[in-house]
Image (cartoon, rainbow, N blue to C red):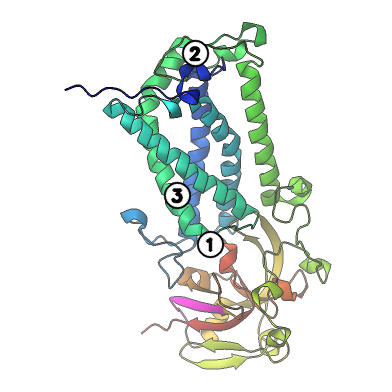
Amino acid sequence: MRVPRLPRPPGPFDPAFWRSPLRGPWLTSVLGASLLPLLVICALTGLASHLAYSPYLGDNAIVPDAPLGIGLPDVVWPTSPAWLYAATQGIHVVSGLMAVPLLLAKLWSAMPKFFDWPPVDSVGQALERLSLLGLVAGALLVFVTGVLNIQLFYPWAFSFVPVHVYAAIIFSASLVLHVGLKMPLVLRSFRERGIVRPLREDLAHTRPEPYDPHTSTPADPRRPTVSRRGFLGTVATASGLLGLMSAAQVIGGPLRPLAILAPHGTDPSGTAAQDAANDFQINKTAQSVGIEPGEIDDGWRLELEGAERMSLTRADLESMEQRTEELPIACVEGWSTTQTWTGVPLADLAELAGATGAGAVFVESLQADGPFRSVTLGRDVIEDERSLLALGVNGEALSADHGYPARIIAPAMPGVHCTKWVGRMSFEVES
């Protein structure tokens, strides 16, 4: 018995509803080909960011080591070059933001396919619909949460990073499926129309592609109001401007005034710095994380543990041999800044605690409970002579908002691993 087909709903399910003469396989293919490299770069640098957190150490993992059953090796993130994390995370944010206009344009170009009727009439179409569902849902979660995270705005109750990572996995898997299904159509479109030939057509010569009910070409196209060249030029300009503005917060210097989308806009700290030496980016102030003035006054002590246990005042630390290093600090939001830090090498503190050659150090902050109040740093970080318990920056003492009386600063580390307001350091003693 043959199952009768349901009648086609009105509105967007009617092919005549979609009338833009620009839509068609060629436009969608060009947008997809332009978008794909940015998505690959964004995904790879996102994976790099995950590895930079050294999730195999202590409680560093903020998502499971094997999300959705896909295991990752215990990769030791290198400490050289010092700008490695600043570069990878900066590229991640820049490529992600540049992808937004292209992604929106590609969704617009393929919009009629979301309203195919019947919804499923073959295995191939079912797979295509599945890939579209994963792409759209994954993209909304990945890009919306990513953009809002850059702005330090969290209008949700869930933890950002795990959701962002899981959504990225869904999006990436759907993208692979979608590309595989659509590659024959892309190759055929480029073979028939060329890759750049339609870009030579001005508005007067812009014509719709031949109608095909299996593609997004319109059944009843209206007259064009913009050429394909103009449309793509607008999308490319928007993508480039977003890239430039986001790159400005990574590169800094003379480009900094262009970073109008950075969390603090063109004001680097977003708060009144006590002095010029401390006038650089601050995500969390001492007050915002519950640091009371009494906790960081003259009564502060660093609890140091290893084979030996001791309590050190700031004066004790200042009496030790100091080292000065020019190191960047970079945050997941994509911004980075390089400053000149002075403090005690972590290797010297390990030796003082009787833990020379320690495999790891557990660092705790004085801040109230919350994410990243503690971190575990590995042997490679401890042994790098540039890794410091910093007491000062740019020739002055740290301000309270930058971690006074002492904070961690280490090369190539995520900013959240450069713990501020350090209260305890426990070195792992080799047995």
- The residue that label 3 is drawn on is 167
Quadrant of residue 420 in the image?
bottom right
Q: Upstream in the sequence, badge 1 or badge 2?
A: 1
The kind of residue on which mark 1 rests is Ala
Q: Furthest residue to the top?
A: 205
Q: Disc 1 to disc 2, how far (Cα)? A: 48 Å
Q: Secondary structure at mark 3?
A: helix
Q: Tally the marks.
A: 3
Question: What is the magenta range?
Answer: 356-364
Instruction: Name the spot of residue 423 as percent of width and height, x first.
Output: 60, 83
Q: Secondary structure at mark 1?
A: loop
Q: Disc 3 to disc 1, how far (Cα)? A: 16 Å
Q: Is residue 237 above or below residue 407?
A: above
Q: In the drawing, does residue 257 fall left or right of residue 240? A: right
Query: Callout 3: 10 Å neighbours few (<14), some, many (20+)?
Result: many
Q: Disc 3 to disc 2, how far (Cα)? A: 35 Å
Q: Is residue 240 above or below residue 328?
A: above
The kind of residue on which mark 2 rests is Gly
Q: Which mark is residue 194?
A: 2
**The stretch drawn in magenta includes residue 363:** yes
- The residue that label 1 is drawn on is 157
